[in-house]
Structures are given as C-alpha cells and as structure tokens.
Image (cartoon, rainbow, N blue to C red):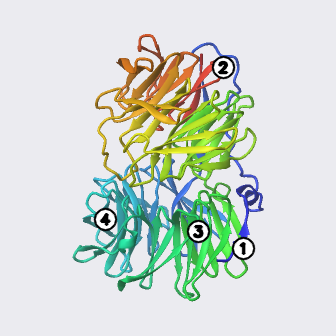
Amino acid sequence: MAGPARMTTRRELLRSSALAGVAGFVAPMAALRESSRGTVTDLGPASSVTSLSGSAAIADKLYVATGGVSPTVVGAYDPAQQKITTKYLLPTGEGAWATTAVGSDLYVGTYAPGDLYQVDSTGTAVTKVADALPDNFIWALDSSPDGKVYAGTYPSGLVFEYDPATGVKRSYGSAVPGEQYVRSIAVDDSTIYAGVGAHAHLIAIDRASGEKRDILPAEFQNRTFVATLALEGGLLAAGLSATGTLLLMNTADPATYDTIQAPGDSYITAITIDASNNDIYFGTRPSGSLYKYDRDTGELTRLLVPYDGAYFSGLFLADGLLRGVLTNTILTYELATGALSGVDVTQAGMPPAPELAMAIATDGARVYVSGKAGIQIHDLASGTSRRTFLPGEAKAMTPARGQLWLSVYTLAYLFRLPPDGDPIRVATLDNDQTRPLDATYSSADNLLAVGTQPEYGRYGGALGLFATDTGQLDVYRDIIKDQSVRSVAIKHGKAYLGSSIRNGLGTTPLATEARLVTFDLAARRVEHELVPVPDAREIVDLIATGNRVYGVTEMGLAFEYDPARRTVVRTSQVSTGSTALVGIGESIYGADTRHVFRLDPATLTTTTVLDGLDTDSGAMIAAAPDGSALFALRGRNLIRIAL
C-alpha cells in the first residue's frame, strides 16, 4: 500500500488561499460587568456552525445540505466560481443526511421530522412530496435508472419508493423486522439494495414483487452496519462497520466478492466507483483518509489525509477531478497531479447558524459549548467567541489541570484542549465503546472518569479512568452488566456510577432497572451496587457532596444516597424529565429544558432560579468555579445567571 500523496493539518489547510480567514466563527457578545444576584445576561448563540451532511451532483454543481441546524439549508455549489450560487430553505427538519438526483431535480430527506423534499435546481421551488411516517428520520436516498426515488428510514428500518411521475409512494415495509436502521441504499433496474444495522444485513429487494433476501456473506454478519453503498455497472461496493471493511460484490452473483481492509480505520463514510478505469475511491474514519483501490492491480493507495479526523460524507468524480464533501469544506483532488485545494462553505456563502448544543462547561474565564465537529469558545472578558474544529462530537467536557478534557463521540476518544490552542487527541477507550455519556475529574486522584455507551448493536458500557498526569488509561467494560455508564461522580476514593439500561443504539434492553454502583478506585473493583429508584431506566446525573451522593432519574426523580449505610435516604420529584445537576461547594443546582432551580440537599426541595428556558438541546448547566454564576441555554442562546 502506497503512502499518502499529501497530509496536512486542518489549520494548515485553512491557511491556504481558498480558506484563509475562516478558522473560527466570531460572534459578538456584550461585555460582562458586575451583576446583581439573579441577573440574566444573554451571551448570544451558544454554538454556530455550517455542518454539511447530504450531498449530490447535478450537472456542473454540487448540492450540499446542512445538519444540526434549523431551518435546513441546501446550497448549490459552483466549483468554477467556488461559491454557493443558490440557497434553498426547507420548511421542516433539523438536518438532512440523504440526497439524490433525478434529472434536474434534487430530492432531500430530512430528520425530525422525516420529510422528502423535491428541489428544482433550475429555479427556486421547494416542495414536500412525501414523508417517512411512521418514522421521523430518512437516513438514505438513491434513485433508479427509470427515475424513481428510494428511501431508507429510522427507527423502523423501512424502505419506501416515491415515483415523481405519479406522486405515488409505495412502502416495502421493514428491510429486516426488528432492525431500526436502513443506513444506506442503492438501486438498479430491478433491485433495491438496503444496508441495515445495528446488526448488519445487506438486503436485496425485488422492485416489482417486494421479495427480500439477505445477500451479506455469513463471515460479515457479526458487523454492526452496512453503512455505505455505491453501485455501478453491476458492482456493489459496501462499507462495513465497525471494522472499516470494503466489500465488493458482483450483483449478478452475490457469492462472488472481494474485500479490502482500510488499515486502522473503523468506518467507510463515502464511496464512488470509477467504472471506466476500474478504480474505487473511498473515505475512512477515524483517520480521515482518502483511498484509491485499483481493481486491476489489487493495489490500495492512501491518497491523502486533508486533516486529522476528516469526515468525507460524499465523493464525486468528473473530468479527472475527485471532489470530496467534508464537514464544512469541499475539497478538489486532481487525479493526474495529486494537487489538492479546498473551499470552506462558510466563506463560499453558507453562513453559520445556531445549532443544537451537545454539552457546556466553563473554567471561569471561558464558556465552552460543543456541537457538530467543533467547540464554540466564549471569552467572557472580551465578549467574543471563536470556534475550534474537533473531529467528532464532545458529549462531555471537563475543565481540569488548566485544560479542557473532551470525551468525544465516535469511538470514545479523549482529547485535551489548551486554553489558546486546538484539541489534541490523547487516548481512546476502545473496548467496543463509542459514545461518552458523562465525565468527571477528581483532583485528589488525578483521574478523569468517563462513562460510556457501547458501539451500535453491542451490549455493555464501560468506565474509563484516565490519569491526567501520566496518561495511563484503564477501561472496565460491562462494569454494570448489560448496561451503559450514564453518570459518574467521585468522592473519598470512590467512583459512583449511575447506569442506563440502554446499550448500543439498535439494541433492546436486557436489564429492566438502572443501578447505582460504588467502585473503589484504589482496589479497582466494584464494592457495592443497588437499584436506587425502582423502575427507573436511567440515572442521568450524579453529584457527590459532603457525605452524600445525589442523583436524578430520567423522569426527574431525585434521590439521596448514604454511602456509609449503603441505602437511599429519601427521594423527591424535582422535574418532569431528564435533568442536569451541578455542584457549587455543598450547594446543588439543576436544569431541565424549561427551568433552572436550586436543590436543597437537606430537604431535596427545589427553588426556581429561572423559568422559560425552552431549549431543544437537552438539559445542560455549568457553574463558574468561584460560584459567581451559572450558565445554561435559553432557546439556542447561552445565558449567564448571576448568583
């Protein structure tokens, strides 16, 4: 395998002539002054981003659709001008993963809700033509040679057809009963190929009769997803997760196939087939590599890594140029010369918009808000913010030792973020873990403790213990049997773990009740466990203060646990849903999606601090280290509440 023709960092790429000046989005904020108790200061959009998901080519333009922002925007990118020449706003949806073209029309599938739109690329018309009901997520789209549109959905794993000529929608039902995802789809004259997860299947569906058969070879049926598909001239290329395997199958004889392994990678995110030269190009994660596979010679060549962790969501080949759509960048690679250039779509004409936040944290001087592929850093002294790129989503952020520690989805990576630098990857939990759920730092133990959810289709979360001074990482898989580690707190040499009965997405829970586990950090063993609240499915947050541990369930029921007596002392209803807790000394504050409150540890009663949050990002709260303020989200804006 040949080495990459070019490898650079994202910062270097952004300094190229096409990308200069857009390393971070700057949002003005009012300078903070001394505030009286209860004063609320609106700090503007918490996190703003241009993040691309779906993409398709029509004539000489690339059409790209945003994800994680509302409204969803579709942009027509003209490579000759390096500009977005037309923008289309979709009335519904929080983003769009799926796109396909039929003639001059673009079809876009949204999520939340799962609507199918027709976009007229010759004009400005946007028309909703179908929906994914009863599902709310269109994951995949493709079009057939005779001009019909085929969609794969979540969470029922459905396949449906839309005929633009008649306006008729036909359902093929679930690709595999019991499986939730149709993550990829490809169509030829007679057959729909549906890539399924979270337990991998490759289903061939007869377009006329609807008959289904699974053509995934038996040796790959332990994979989680057939996540990516490309089809050309009877060759079906499939990306298998989470092993980074490329399966090349002859559709006339599915028993005839070859496999290519992307070294060190887990996911194949985009594929295009160059039938005229018998070559295949594909992008992988987590390395962010672009590969070429020559079918004539069997040679696999890593062409480039545009920056660490790059995510190719689309690849398009035309006139000797390979164009790649990344998180917010469109790259052009010249096949003959290996020359690489790139354009940031923000600079090209798709400005950032407020996004759903993933987590918030503060070190006192700054407030950090994580989102899709980045961290928005609000400087409280200057009243400005900047965005730094992150190859993934920080699900938990923990200030410690003068840096911010990021627990990142996917593959449960740990990064550290220096105050004035870019994120640096330091470790991965491995052990089939993918989604961090909570993290906390113990200065007494120099430990960052991270609780995780396993890979799609897998059971058994983990506790990761990372020594911030030495870099030693220890991972304890399935520490709460058949459950994920949803919340973590540390006190007096003990880690307290709250579980979730939910495992990897696409699984059915095996346990029925969430558990509270005491883990001895010195002995590195489980010391005690119990069910703190009967019938609770998740312990969504934990706070250890004084000689007690306080937790809250997914239904907003708080409990007080006495470690000495190993018993729950009392419970109290503090909210109506998932709630985040934060400690300031021995005081506890909480937030759900509607209000911020103070929780009295002595009585488990609450006092409202602020109403009217109305955030769609979930329950989030952070506290200034000196106890002077709380930070929360109101709508999609960041607010400061003086204490």
> Rounded to the nearest whole Å, what is the CA distance between mark 3 and mark 4?
33 Å
Q: Mark 4 to mark 1: distance in Å?
A: 40 Å
Between label 2 and label 4, give the one nearer the viewer. Answer: 2
Q: Check residue 263 in the rendering and tell me which mark sits there, or answer none.
A: 3
Q: Amino acid at mark 3?
A: Pro
The spot of residue 326 in percent (x, y) is: 59, 61
Percent position of residue 514, x then y: 35, 34
Q: CA distance from mark 2 to mark 4?
A: 54 Å
> In this figure, which residue is indicated by the disc labeled 1?
5
Residue 62 can be seen in this image: no
Q: Nearer the viewer, residue 566 or 179?
A: 566
- Quadrant for the N terminus in the image: bottom right
**Left or right: 394, with 255 as reference point:** right
Q: Is residue 7 left or right of residue 184?
A: right
The kind of residue on which mark 4 rests is Val
Q: Amino acid at mark 2?
A: Asp
Helix, strand or loop at mark 4:
strand
**Sequence-wise first label, 4 or 1:** 1
The residue indicated by pointer 4 is 159
Which amino acid, by three-letter code, is at mark 1? Ala
Residue at 47% from the left image edge and 22% from the top image edge: 549
Which badge, 2 or 4, is on the more N-terminal residue?
Answer: 4
The one of 146 and 404 positioned closer to us in this rendering: 404
Depth-wise, is mark 4 or mark 1 nearer the camera?
1
Between the residue at mark 1 and the residue at mark 2, the CA separation in whole angstroms equals: 50 Å
Q: Position of residue 454 (x, y in %)?
A: 44, 49
Q: Residue at x 62, y 60 (%)?
A: 310
Position of residue 525 relative to residue 611, above or below, is below
Q: Which residue is mark 2?
A: 626
> Label 3's element?
loop
Mark 3 or mark 4: which comes first in sequence?
A: 4
